[in-house]
Image (cartoon, rainbow, N blue to C red):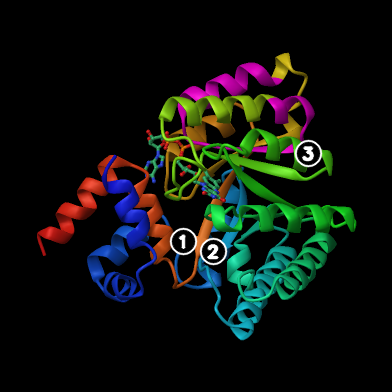
Amino acid sequence: MVLRPLLVRASQSEALARQITATTFTRRMAMRFVAGEELDDGIRAARRLAHEGKRVSLDYVGEHADTQAAARDAAKVYLEAIDRIGAEGLPAGLSVKPTQLGLSVSRDLCEQLIDEIAAAAAAIDAHITLDMEDSRVTEDTVRLVESLQKRGQRHVGCAVQSYLHRARADVRRLSAVGASLRLCKGAYSEPPYVAYTSRREVDASWADCAKYLIQHGTYPRLATHDHRLVARAKADLPRLGRDRDDFEFQMLYGVRADMQDALVRDGYRLCVYVPFGSNWFAYFMRRIAERPANAVFFVRALGNR
Ligand SMILES: Cc1cc2nc3c(=O)[nH]c(=O)nc-3n(C[C@H](O)[C@H](O)[C@H](O)COP(=O)(O)OP(=O)(O)OC[C@H]3O[C@@H](n4cnc5c(N)ncnc54)[C@H](O)[C@@H]3O)c2cc1C
């Protein structure tokens, strides 16, 4: 789809962010995918989802902290989220973007902040997944997870994007250190020398990686709303000897609630990725970009204003 790279690129525009986040109709549209602007909103959503038998991974939306102070501020919100999760005994963990914790400013600071959050998470047995951002930070993110795992920080894993040529190698490399991985297709716009461009190749890579994780991985987190890939994983799981309490499906807040409910009804573990926070613009634009119907609706609605 031609619109996708344009929309992903637009997600990095600060001017557009200011305009879109101040507009009532786009805010309303965004709140389909985002629980709200405050931690309280994320916790409220987690409570409701827990009541429906779902797990949650809370994401404080934001990326690319450009100062150490901004990275520390984001870490504080995550630590507060851990406190709230622990106090309420919610079945929830965190999704964290390394650049939000200063990866591009100081790798050492980023690792130190993740370490602090991971220690707090470990104390309440909550899991942290480092979201995988664009391919400029893939290797750094993989190294962070390797380093944390080797130092015994078992509560931290990361996402692997099947659209990357390196995905099959990464699931093996990270499984070898025992990291629990989230397998997704990938939401950024990448050049063809880095990522597959056809849906067929991206899906084949996802299916291969899923098979490897089901057979050899640590608690696989299979993140997709693609009903064909979910059906295939469901068939592979018992055949490859993976118990239902030793993996989970993951889906996004506001996407395919029907599939989410059906999985829970069928006795599968399901974790919902729940974003909250006021910097929702880039996250929202990626959700718009990944589905042609969303993109067309969004562009038309903007044009009509
Ligand atoms: C829990 C979770 C965590 C993720 N973490 C990351 C990450 O760390 N890094 C990263 O790059 N990407 C991440 N993603 C996004 C992912 O890479 C895909 O962009 C996204 O999930 C769409 O791919 P799909 O597997 O659902 O398949 P698709 O083939 O894109 O979609 C299958 C079907 O799902 C529905 N659907 C999918 N997306 C939408 C949407 N936005 N709006 C409405 N319906 C939709 C549609 O019915 C569509 O036909 C994550 C996704 C999930 C579920």
How many other residues sit within 10 Å of disc 3, few (<14), some (14-19) or many (≥20)? many
Q: Position of residue 262 (x, y in %)?
A: 51, 30
| Residue type at numbered disc 2 | Gly
Q: Residue at x 15, y 53 (%)?
A: 300
Image vertical order of residue 38 relative to residue 226, above or below: below
Q: Judge left or right: residue 217 versus residue 153.
A: left
Q: Position of residue 43 (x, y in %)?
A: 58, 64
* Residue at mark 1 to residue at mark 3: CA–CA distance: 32 Å
Say if the magenta span includes residue 263: no
* Residue at mark 2 to residue at mark 3: CA–CA distance: 30 Å
Q: Position of residue 38 (x, y in %)?
A: 50, 73
Q: Is residue 64 visible?
A: yes
Residue span colored magenta: 212-237
Q: Which residue is mark 1?
A: 35
Q: Which residue is mark 3?
A: 175
Q: Residue at x 48, y 50 (%)?
A: 253
> Which comes sooner in the sequence, label 1 or label 3?
1
Count the marks: how many?
3
| Residue type at numbered disc 1 | Ala
Nearest to the observer: residue 167 or residue 30: 167
